[in-house]
Amino acid sequence: MVRLIDIAERLGVSVMTVSKALRDDQLDVAPATRTRIKAAAKEMGYLPDPGAQSLRNGLTKLLGLVIPTTTNPIFARMLFAIEERTHALGYDLMLSHTHNMIEREEVCIRRLLARRVDGIFVAPVYRMGNEARIYRELLTSKTPVVLLGSPAAFCSQFVSVQPEEVNASYAATRHLLELGHKRIAYFTGPLPAIWAQERYEGFRRAHSEAGLDVDDKLVFHAGSTIEDGAKAALQFANEKCQATAIQTANDLIAIGCAEMLLKQGIKIPKDISLVGFGNILVSEHFRVPLTTIRQPKYRMGTAAVEMMTQLIQGERVENRRLAAELVIRDSTAAPRLD
């Protein structure tokens, strides 16, 4: 391993001069000397010692990322953007999975705090309460935090980046209403999740503006997975509620729903229209390409890194909501005229 003393001996300068040159000290080291030292360091394969840098400036150049799972395409895309941007900025990223378990989330965050990371990106595990001990600990630690998704009461002290959930869901419902659908079923996300609540609010608001009431019999509590969507679709089919369209809280629910309905001989969109939310890759390539909301996954990851660097530099940061747009594909059409 190349050391500062090795560079100093090769060039006939002091170790202090090499150290200052590599820190880009413009006061004590002449430009020509800095250039010569940096060229020699690169040629010799010198790598700075992260531990020494941390002692000097108080930064570890480590960032933490806490998400439910990388098998969720939404978080996989955000992870790609965050890793790409943090790498370019010279940070290492430590990834932890919560599997949407509160106890595991606490362990993940405490381990990152113990590693003295410079900041943490968190997709919260939503719970019903207004407070959460681990988020109080985060606040006390003064570690910069950026939430990936809607802030709930227990984590509202931290800045967040999220899509325009209400407006996007409203646009999806308006699309179905404009096609002529009057009885639209809705498959909700997890009850404690703020994003699920906001997407349902968009659905409700579009009905209200159209002078229609939401029929509670058409609201089915799903979850967030393909399996959840299939179970909700089976319940929907068994109850024979005469809906002509289904709107779901995310694409995974929609795909599980579609698989179940297609197995039962229900044609999409001839018999029933279907809308998702997220625009994950499979939604475009599903056997019935899915009408959905294009969620700004990559842009959310990029924005989160921008916000984090501002926080680390001590700047004031505001919450960011990014626009999401409707993508119309083959899974929606006007209702059948029987």
Image (cartoon, grey):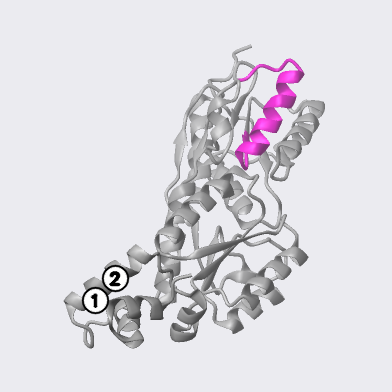
Element under disc 1: helix
Three-letter amino acid code at disc 1? Answer: Arg
Q: Could one spot residue 131 in this view of the protein?
A: no
Q: For this rendering, which residue is in front, 235 or 315?
A: 315
Counting the numbered discs, the total is: 2
Residue 248 within the magenta-colored segment of the rendering:
yes
Query: Can you say whether 81 is above or below 104 in the image?
Result: above
Q: Residue 239 placed where, x, y %?
A: 80, 29
| 95 to the left or right of 100 | left
Query: Can you say whether 316 is above or below 270 in the image?
Result: below
Label 1 sits on residue: 34
Label 2 sits on residue: 38
Q: CA distance from mark 2 to mark 1?
A: 6 Å
Three-letter amino acid code at disc 2? Answer: Lys
Query: Can you say whether 126 is above or below 114 in the image?
Result: above
Q: Which residues are magenta?
A: 247-268
Residues at marks 2 and 1 touching, judged by CB atoms closer than 8 Å: yes
Query: Can you say whether 209 is above or below 230 in the image?
Result: below
Residue at 57% x, 43% y: name it.
203
Q: Residue 182 placed where, x, y %?
A: 59, 29
